[in-house]
Amino acid sequence: MERLIRALLALTYGLESRLLRREERGSVTTEHVLWAVAVIAIVGIVVAAVKAYVTSQAGNIK
């Protein structure tokens, strides 16, 4: 009976330590996705600004 209790306690402590350990897999991927979204937004703003400038300058051509 004592062996069974020890085995159950060992199993409980093992599972508890796994649950308390913080998993950080995937955090690099999330960071890369956020950077990609930021770069795409910046490029979109630059493209819109250049397009507006070119359109306004094209109106001045005689």
Image (cartoon, rainbow, N blue to C red):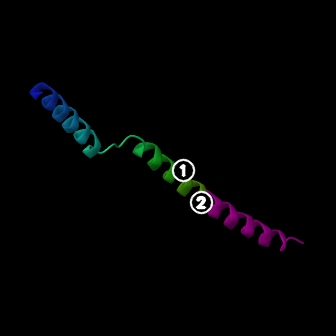
- Position of residue 8 relative to residue 31, above or below, is above
The residue that mark 2 highlights is: 41
Q: Residue at x 14, y 32 (%)?
A: 5
Amino acid on which disc 2 is placed: Ala
Q: Is residue 40 left or right of residue 12?
A: right
The chief SS type of the magenta part is helix
Which of the two residues, 2 or 42, is positioned nearer the viewer here?
2
What residue span does the magenta drawing correspond to?
A: 42-62
Q: Which mark identifies residue 45?
A: none
Number of numbered discs: 2
Which residue, as the protein is rendered here, is positioned at the far left? 2
The quarter holding residue 61 reads bottom right
Q: Disc 1 on helix, strand or loop?
A: helix
Q: Disc 2 on helix, strand or loop?
A: helix
The residue that mark 1 highlights is: 36
Q: If you read the primary sequence from the N terminus, does the residue marked by circle 1 or circle 2 appear first?
A: 1
Q: Residues within 10 Å of mark 2 (few under 14, many from 20)?
A: few
Q: Residue at x 33, y 42 (%)?
A: 23
Which of the two residues, 5 or 30, is positioned nearer the viewer here?
5
Which residue, as the protein is rendered here, is positioned at the far front? 1
